[in-house]
Amino acid sequence: MTFLEKQATNFLNQWRRIQSFNKTINGKLGKNGAFANVTGYLLTALGGDSSNVSCGETGSRDAASSAKALQTYNTLKNCSKSITAACTMPASIVPADVISKFTGFCMTKFNEAKTASDDCRTNKQYTSNGTAACECWSKVGAVITTIKSSSDCSASTYSKAVKQFKNACVQTFMTCRKEEDASVQLVYTCGSGEVLSTASSSSSSGRLASHMSIMAHSSLQ
C-alpha cells in the first residue's frame, strides 16, 4: 500500500505533468510566426530600411526612439527563429524508448496493481475470508515485484527536465509578446507625419496615415 500510495501516485502525477508541459510547449511552437505582421508594420513605420531607421515626424529623427524601435524590430524579426529554437524539445529530454515504457509497461502495471489492491480491500469475498485475502494481496505483491524488478518507472527526472524546458520556451515567447505590445505605440510614434490643412478639409500625410487602416486589422491585442 505504501508503494502504491507513493510510487504509483507520484508516477501518474509526473506523467500527467509531462503531457501538460508538452502541450504548452507545442502551443507556443505553433505560434512562432505570430509576430511577422507587426514586424512588417514597424519596419514600414521606421522608413522601410532597417539599416537607416527614422522615428518621428517627416524630416526629423528622434535618436532615442529610433534606437528603441530598432531594438524592438530586431527582436520581433528574430522571434520565429528564437521561438522555434526555444520550443523544439530535443528527443533526448524524454527519449522515445522511455515514453514507450511509461505509456506501456509502467502505466499498465501501476494501474493493474492499483485496481487489484482496491479489489482486495473492498471485495466481500476477501473482507470475510482471511485466506482468500492473503492470496489476493500476494497477487498484488507479485505485480509490484515485477515493477520493481524492471528498469525504473519513475518519471520525476523527466518531469523536472520538461518543466525547465517549458519555462524557457514560455519566457522566449513572452519576450516576443512584450516587444509586440511595445511596437503598437512605436508604430504610431515613429510613423507620424505632418498634417496638412486646407480651408475645406484636413488630410494627414507621412507614414502614420498609411498605418491607420493597417493597424485596425492587425492582431495586436
Image: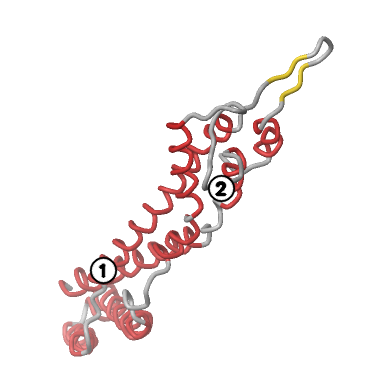
Locate residue 71: give its quadrant.
top left
Which three-letter amino acid code belongs to the residue tagged 2?
Answer: Thr
* Labelled disc at residue 160: none
Q: Amino acid at mark 1?
A: Thr
Secondary structure beneath dot 1 equals helix
Residue name at image x 77 percent, y 17 percent? 202
Q: Is residue 9 visible?
A: yes
Tell me the mark number nearer the camera, choosing from 2 and 1: 2
| Residue at the spot of label 1 | 9
Question: In the rendering, which numbered label is found on residue 39?
Answer: 2
- For the C terminus, the image quarter is top right
Q: Is residue 72 left or right of residue 42?
A: left
Q: Nearer the viewer, residue 181 or 51?
A: 51
* SS for dot 2: helix
In this orientation, which residue lies closer to the viewer: 53 or 65?
A: 53
Above or below, comparing residue 186 to residue 100 in the picture: above
Visual colour scheme: secondary structure
